[in-house]
Image (cartoon, grey):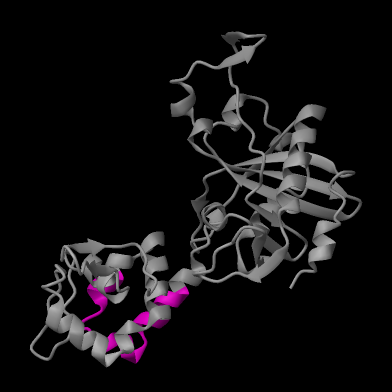
Amino acid sequence: MINLDDFKNWDIENSAVTLWFFKRPTKDEQGLPKFRGNWLDIDDGIERVLKDAALFTRNQVDEVNAYGLLAQAQEGSVLEISADETNVGLIRDQMAAELANKQITNVKGVLNSLAYAAKFVVGDNTLIAFKKLDSSWSTKKSSKLIPAAFVDDTLTLAPENTFQLEKTFDFFLTEDDILICQKAAFETVLFYKAAHTEDFGMLVSEPDFENIFADVAPLVNFVGENKLHLRRASAIRQKRHYADQQFMDNLRDRHVEFRLQINFDATGKIIPCEDTCRDIFNALLDHRLKSGFSENIYAVPDVSPA
């Protein structure tokens, strides 16, 4: 695990800064993202705000926890994962040197970018901070807006191609590790699905899970590469309600009462299909509640026992 003091003491203030942009990549024959980075010349003012954003984000960190499929970075903490476990090395390779043929010379090189990355360099040491970009950086969004600014009590037209830089970063890349402040942004920028996919594969091959189904193939097709479904499958594996005989008996007896569309064969095994997979997931996540007062049935995103 990274030494938090080393991270907190890294000399951002006296570093040289370059700013790189990355568009949404295509995939190669092995399914790996083909990142292509380009750097943009920045003035002293932009360098200052990038340093301030990195310092501000870092100063909020008091604790480092291990990255997990269901772990979340809480206030004051970050999640840590080894760089070798992700695709970040492909991005680092792109950012190795500010070559002339990689320099952005017009606004098209910035518009529709997936993320930007600020590279802070001190001697032979490098720290990279990443920020996922929102729709305001898209061609479609910018073409519908007229840039304006409030100056001296007056609203005036601002220069074209005006962008908003965030005051925080989503995650940092050190020499060997990634420190994650915003998990969803990290997973989107680095296309980090490998762990979720592997976890789902282990789930569907687990006898306790496989044996509650007549056929798991429709469920596998339903999940596919969908990031949300993969994450929910990981939650199902963690909760393990499928291995609880009483839970499964209650599901068979009361799924209609709780308005779940689930089909069972004569032996009590679930028969999944395209129309029922969503309800099967809701059931195995235990995401159904019944009011003891109104007797209404509620679909809930998460539950904690009272």
Q: Can see residue 303?
A: yes
Residue 219 among those drawn in magenta = yes
Residue 255 screen position, x and y as percent: 15, 75
160 relative to 278, above or below:
above
Residue 114 screen position, x and y as percent: 54, 43
Q: Nearer the viewer, residue 106 or 232?
A: 232
Residue 110 among those drawn in magenta = no
Q: Nearer the viewer, residue 233 or 190?
A: 233
Q: Is most of the magenta stretch helix, strand or loop?
A: helix
Q: Nearer the viewer, residue 113 or 93?
A: 113
The residue drawn where x is 22% and y is 68% is: 279
The answer to which image quadrant residue 105 occupies is top right
The residue drawn where x is 32% and y is 66% is: 223
Q: Quadrant of the N terminus?
A: bottom right
52 relative to 188, above or below:
above
The residue drawn where x is 14% and y is 88% is: 268
Residue 256 screen position, x and y as percent: 11, 73
The answer to which image quadrant residue 252 occupies is bottom left
